[in-house]
Amino acid sequence: SCDASQLCNCSSMGLDFIPPGLTAKITVLNLAHNRIKHVRSQDLQQAVNLRALLLQSNEISSIDEDSFWSLAKLELLDLSNNSLAHLSPVWFGHLFSLQHLHLQGNSYRDLGQGSPFSGLRNLSSLHLGNRRFSVIRQGNFEGIELLHKLWIDGSNLSQYEQGSLKSIKEINHMIINIRSISVFSEIVRDLLHSVTWLEVRRIVFNSTAEMQVLRVMSLSFAKKLSFRQTLLTDATVPEIVSILEDMPKLVELELVDCRLLGTGRWEMQIQANQSQTLRVLTIEKLSIEEFYLFTDLQAVEGLLSPFTRITVRNTKVFLVPCRISQHLLSLEYLDLSANLLGDQSLEHSACLGGWPSLQTLNLSQNSLSDLEMTSKSLSHLGNLIVLDISQNNFGEIPDVCEWTKTLKYLNLSGTQIPKVTTCIPPTLEVLDVSANNLKEFGLQLPFLKELYLTRNQLKTLPGAAPIPNLVALSVRRNKLNSFSKEEFESFKRMELLDASDNNFICSCEFLSFIHQEAGIARVLVGWPDKYVCDSPLAVRGAQVGAVHLSLLECHRSLVVSLICVLVFLVILLLVAVGYKYHVVWYLRMTWAWLQAKRKPKRAPPKDVCYDAFVSYSENDSDWVENTMVRELEQACPPFRLCLHKRDFVPGKWIVDNIIDSIEKSRKTLFVLSEHFVQSEWCKYELDFSHFRLFDENNDAAILILLEPIRSEAIPKRFCKLRKIMNTKTYLEWPLEEEQQQSFWFNLKIALRS
């Protein structure tokens, strides 16, 4: 189970004990999701260079005291979700390099009489607690002075000795899952000056008497305060606001997945003693059971003027009272996406004098249907620069609309617009009208620099003359089949043209354009699903100048028209047979398979330019592109991933692209799901290219199980995949947020190996 870099993945193998024979070469050992009950002294004695040890989700109930003494280089230890009834400080006494320690989900009731962590001077993150965890004693955290993250699952924590957490001088992010208000207040008292971001989960604020106990929070120096899965009532909201107003350094307040019992008729008047520091408010998925009875919030009007950023997303907001909007004097960013705002309610919400400083407004995924009315409602916003009204349902739009003169960015993607008109403001620098049903684009936009026309029905490029300053143009997933020189005569400032996923046909004119327009920094003209032109000449611009095309290539239509009379019946017959039995496809696949077999097993090191090639289904692209790619490519140092959408060579046949990309990548990531095994393209990748990885019996392949795959859902032709999944371990994407950090750590270790 160990690869060339000695990263050993033995998870989910049904092991009852740590396997023998571990050597000093091993750097990562994953034993998660097994049945290990006991860690013995000799189990890890030789693994002196181990940096990550993952033992979560086993049945470990006992650990010999000297089991970890040889692991001086260990940086990550995960013992979460086991059956440890107590924690011994002797276990961690020799872990001088340990940075991440996960102990949550066991059965211990306390941390002992002393500190189990006194020798962990380099500790950065600590996760502890469980449903039985009930006591924190003074001295339990002695030896820890600085933590990036402290996560305490204290849902049944009933006893906290004052001063227990005071020894930690600085905590960047503290997450605490707690129910007891009194215990929480005692913890806050010890963390007044040490926590920068305090995140509280599953707490219930029921009565004003409980809130008096929390008055100590007003002395906290925290800069960000988050409440998740918290219950609020009309009686407690005024008390909470009063406490927040007094917090001297609070900048950001966040409410995520909370519940509010009430209608905003608060029993006491909130004093408008405005906070001097609070500027950012985020509310997501706030559940108000009787939201349609909610009041106009007059009680909080005086508190709103200092806010500069407000996000209220997915909270069933159907109206912002005019008086509230008029009191948001400093607001520069407002996100009201995924709510219930309609045309009439927006007109009332953005009333005259409302949002006077607003620069960015996000109204995507609402119930807007009249673009003329929307533009008029927002026309008085004299500072508005960015407007996102995507994923509404505007349909046909008028010829004339009234917009603010300052608007530079407009997102109208996914709004069911069949045709663009002069309603679009001429002041724009960025326009996104993707995912509509546009068949043409001919607007006069003299200042436009970026235009996004992805997923429309365009057959020709937009005219260049009306948009002379265009720098970036995206026409992906349209119906383009060729470019002409005339279409690009005025695009002299173009730096990026993305025309991938279209129906390009290889021609003399097309080749000539690619050659003559080499001044464009980046031209993307291909996508695997719809390649018609597979000539390498259409891609490698450096070779186009030396191309001498034959009469057939330059005058294909004329020559074909002369000979088609003689061979029409033959061609018709061959086409019918070939179409029925996919002859052409299988011939090309066979040829590619033979070519791949003859290639050397490994590319020269100088040709390897990617850390990993990612194989995935298009249906899983949202997770791959928005979650995995962002996590890996923004890592430090960043990984360079090869994605077919972004990195395949335009004009090149997809199978050649796949093989070349694998050979130029150190690893290959397979994102497995039921969509993957049902995808035709994934079948071809496994059948004709990926066999190289498996036949060579190396460990260049990394399997990620995005979701459980039923064995009956795997087609019989995926025999190699069945074999690999039965004999090799894979990384499973956890739905629990607390386990995702370990997943990313394991994946990064595997990629660096």
Image: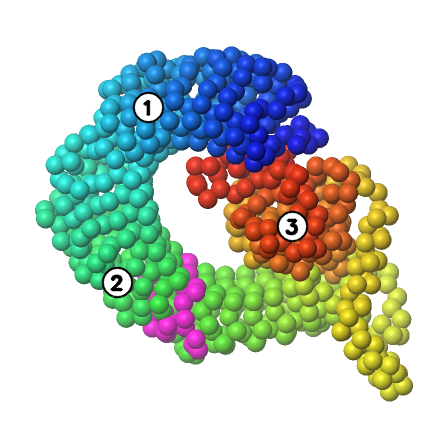
Q: Which residues are magenta?
A: 369-397
Label 3 residue SS: strand
Q: Are marks 2 and 1 in contact (CB under 8 Å)?
A: no
Q: Amino acid at mark 2?
A: Leu
Task: Please tell me in which quadrant of the rendered image residue 704 appears.
Answer: top right
For the residues labelled 2 and 1, the Cα–Cα distance comes to 48 Å
Q: Indicate which label's residue lies in the foreground, 2 or 3.
A: 3
Q: Label 3 belongs to which residue?
A: 615
Task: Please tell me in which quadrant of the rendered image residue 118 appears.
Answer: top left
Q: Visible in this render: residue 15?
A: yes
Classified by dominant secondary structure, the portion drawn in magenta counts as loop
Asked if 368 appears above or below 40 in the picture, the reply is below
Figure quadrant of the N terminus: top right
Residue for point 20% across, 51% down:
261
For residue 496, side relative to residue 744 (left or right): right
What numbered label is drawn on residue 109? 1
